[in-house]
Amino acid sequence: MARSPHGLLMLLLLHYLMVALDYHKANGLSASKDHQEVTVIEYQEAILACKTPKKTTSSRLEWKKLGQGVSLVYYQQALQGDFKDRAEMIDFNIRIKNVTRNDAGKYRCEVSAPSDQGQNLQEDTVTLEVLVAPAVPSCEVPTSVMSGSVVELRCQDKEGNPAPEYTWFKDGTSLLGNQKLGKHNSSYTMNTKSGILQFNMISKMDSGEYYCEARNSVGHRRCPGKRMQVDVLNISGIIAAVVVVAFVISVCGLSVCYAQRKGYFSKESSFQKGSPASKAMAMSENDFKHTKSFII
């Protein structure tokens, strides 16, 4: 009876799976089916448990931290690196006395022991998550803005885990309403996830001292308050100033025209014509004419 291509493919996959299982059994390789996850607050203690059979005198234990590269944590019956001073072994388990955020990651314990089928190797993995309180957030608050403009206040923390939510305060009063994602009105919009407080059309009433608070399940911190002043654009004052400048320019122009009509600007030339230098020039010319005529 002919088999379909799909049926033949399934048989081949089943065959390879059975071969792989026989290989692992023959070499004594096994792994824990339950992946462990350990969550701890920074600077507290954590225990990384290795779920393997009871330790024997012939067992060999290694702990490794996985990542871009593999680093040894416990090797040749000794803790490695900075774990020497802040961790200890309890049977197959590691007790870290002072967990830091750099300890977060995936760990693997490997236990090998001789058996009737050869070397028996068992593995177990543990993921360590470190919760970190927010640091003092970085806040951006402009000192002076013009009324009617669009203004953004920014708040950000890069250390908190899980990522914190942000709340803005004005003069000590929270601007966050009952809605989880933020409060919306005609004046501003606050996003508790990004930490941005945006005024769509800021007014004089929005002047005050602002600060932001970053909060997660571990703790909360806030930035120092900064005052923002909203200045109102004085349109009537600007118009009055323009009128005054135009009036001054007009008066100066009329004065110049009046002076030209009265001939104040031509007196200098008249004075120059009646000056001794001009008279001397005229006498020189007359003497020259007289001498010329005498010679003739």
Image (tube, rainbow, N blue to C red):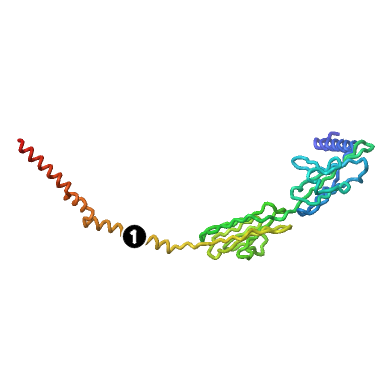
**How many numbered dots are placed on residues in this image?**
1
Dividing the picture into quadrants, the one containing residue 222 is bottom right
Instruction: Provide residue 259's location: percent of width, then percent of height.
Output: 24, 57
Name the quarter where the C terminus is drawn. top left
Determine whether, in the image, residue 61 is placed left or right of residue 215: right
Instruction: Provide residue 1's location: percent of width, then percent of height.
Output: 86, 34
- Residue 148's place in the image compared with 68, above or below, is below
The residue closer to the viewer here, 41 or 126, is 41
As helix, strand or loop, the secondary structure at mark 1 comes to: helix
Residue at horizontal 33 percent and vertical 58 percent from the top = 249
The residue closer to the viewer here, 24 or 39, is 39
Dividing the picture into quadrants, the one containing residue 167 is bottom right
Determine whether, in the image, residue 239 is placed left or right of residue 289: right
Kindly give the residue lying farthest to the right in the view shown.
116
Tell me if residue 221 can be seen: yes
Instruction: Provide residue 88's location: percent of width, then percent of height.
Output: 84, 48
Residue at horizontal 68 percent and vertical 61 percent from the top = 180
Residue at horizontal 92 percent and vertical 38 percent from the top = 114
Dividing the picture into quadrants, the one containing residue 141 is bottom right
Instruction: Provide residue 166's location: percent of width, then percent of height.
Output: 66, 58
Q: Residues within 10 Å of mark 1 (few under 14, many from 20)?
A: few
Tag 1 residue: 248
